[in-house]
Amino acid sequence: MASAVRAEGARHPILEVRDATHRFGDVLALDRVSITAAQGEFLTILGESGSGKTTLLRIVSGLEKPSELESLRIAGQDVARVPASDRNCTTVFQHYALFPHMSVGENVEYGLKVRGVALVERRRRATEALALVRLGDKFDRRVHQLSGGERQRVALARALVTRPAILLLDEPLGALDEKLRQDMQVELLDLHRKLGLTFVYITHSQEEALTMSDRIILMRRGRIVQEGTPANIFERPATRFVADFMGMENLIPARFEGLEDGFAVARVGAHRVRGNWCGVEQAASGDQVHVGVRAERVRFAVSGDEGHPNQITCRQGQTVYKGKYVDQGAETELGTISARIWDHGLDPARITHLWWRTEDCVIVPD
Amino acid sequence: MRGWYSNFVSAGWVVPVFTVVWIGLVVVPLLIMVLFSFVEIRDYRVVYDLTLKNWESLIDSGRWISVVRTLRVTAVITLIEILVAFPFALWLAKGCKSKNVKAAIITLLTIPFFLDPSSRTIVWRAILGKSGIINTVFIELGLIDQPMEWLLFSEFAVHFGMIAPYFPTMVFPIYLVLTLIDDDYLQASQDLGASPLQTLIHIILPLALPGIVAGIVFTMVPLMAAFVEPGMLGGGFVNLLGESVEAALRNLKYPTAAALSAVVIALLAVLLTALVLILRRRGSLGAIFVTLKR
């Protein structure tokens, strides 16, 4: 399904940004960034603050004028010189930006009002949009009477009511608390499925990006460092930065040695570790690389004679209780390795060896 | 520190102290003034017999014409100030990107506050007068044969002379309220399809309303009582209430001055009440300020 969407999108992207560059004074916020989004795709732009992701979104919406831009097309139409008010996309702002002097309903119908839609018609459509976000009975409420989650949904309804081709969401869940954020994630996915609209979603949370997206674009310092499906970015990070950003707990500096049976081999001290090579370009022997393995993919053995791959002896390190699981540090010749223990019956003191499957291990360039 | 502060802001003594002080310093003198308009002065001594003479003489002497004139001049100048100050404040708050330019303009705007009204007004006589700079230059250039007499000692001169001094009191409150409007609202409006004009009408103006009202109050109230500019630039041809009060006081006609002042205050009360009533339909002004905070 997702791959069919992408194939279609490659031919007729609903959004196409080519070579956008933006400077704030001397600071290069975006460096020749190109992105496309397919009709109906949930595209997430992921990155830490200062990575340029919000600037990119604001260039798409027209609220920021890029320093240089090759082209910007929305639904096939070149909008590089079209003002924000005439672009076929709307934004859900990080702090919602609901107009404080208007009621909930007046906020939602605003986009229709400025387009000259008659009162009765726009009331009807605003009520519909509010019903879509389960706030059908809140039309006459004042904005400041709403909870954070409700404001979030009003902002969504307001952006959706004009039926834009693309919905731009700028860290929309950033201001909500944990539980509400998870509920809203589900709700956003529901809306996305129901409306078949293209979502371009900005976030700094890798967890949010993994949960919601068809495709993720990871940015750093104004450039795209990797793009792909959530599984692709999660399992095959292309650089040490991506691996770290996507929460890979164990990253061990190593020297690249070569290829063996389709796997890369890296040397850490006296040990040879095998894993998937994830870099874009092939490394040369002796290059500085990192061996990465996720804590939850590290397995335990109580004796060293079972012939597991990547097996290493260990001593018990620090134990951090996390509720659902325990993060167990283990001192090895490779350094401290973090392992996740879900089995509360397992006594960490009995663990003598760690190992991980070769497929679960990545070797990434610096 | 925090305890001291919270004690201070939640203190119950504020309301009674304010009430007593304000009544003592403002309300009681006002009532005495109104009372004074109903007494007479004979042989430089106040005679405490209540009489309507002062009020009758206000009407008989045709001073009501100056009431109407005062209202008209005040209304026209206030309107001009709004029309000039709002775009200027909007530029200053949202358009002007340079902090230095902004600081310089704000400083320049305070100049009228530290100049004595007489000295800043008297200069215009030398500029607008019959043999003043403008007439001299125009005649030298051959643009006119006779000096333009309407430049000075006319309603034009009074309006002209009052626009600059009463400009800052209109600009500052509007500027302040505009800086409180988050740029996100303006961008959201644009993003949702509004033209700049629509954003101005639907977002900026309603949110700026408290500042505009404050600007009107701060500008209109002193305008109603202004006497220096009308006196010096009107040259006796443009009698306004403030001037009449001043003249009455100079002639020691305290009851007349009191009656005239009572008229000014009554007019202001009526105008401000009307303003508040009109605005109440737009929802409470306080609520807008509350919601402007994040």
Image (tube, rainbow, N blue to C red):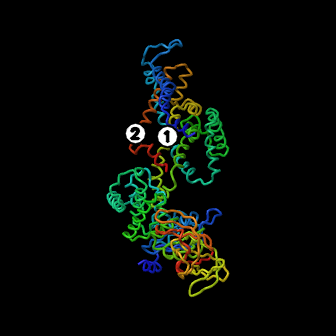
| Rendered residue at 35%/54% (across/down) | A138
Residue B265 in percent (x, y) is at 47, 29
**Is residue B103 shown left or right of residue B193?**
right
- At mark 2, the secondary structure is helix
Q: Is residue A158 above or below residue A271?
A: above
Are the numbered discs 2 and 1 placed on the same chain, yes or no?
Answer: yes
- Residue type at the position of mark 1: Ile
Look at the picture and state if A363 lies above or below A317.
below
Comes first in the chain, label 2 or label 1: 1
Q: Secondary structure at mark 1?
A: helix
Which residue sits at x=43%, y=60%? A179
- A159 vs A305: above or below: above
Alpha carbon distance from label 2 to label 1: 15 Å
Q: Identify which residue, A24 or A174, lies in the foreground.
A: A174
Q: Which numbered tag is attached to residue B90? A: none
* Disc 2 residue type (three-letter): Leu
Give the image location of residue A360, x and y in percent.
52, 78
Say above or below: A355 vs A147: below
Q: Nearer the viewer, mark 2 or mark 1?
A: 2
Foreground residue, B239 or A53? Answer: A53
Give percent across and percent down for residue B239: 52, 30
Instruction: Give the residue furthest to the bottom.
Output: A261
Q: Residues within 10 Å of mark 2 (few under 14, many from 20)?
A: few
Residue at the spot of label 1: B216
Residue A184 at what x, y percent from top left? 42, 62
Q: Which residue is mark 2?
A: B277
Q: Residue at x 44, y 73 (%)?
A: A41
Chain at numbered mark 1: B
Task: Report whether residue A246 is seen.
Answer: no
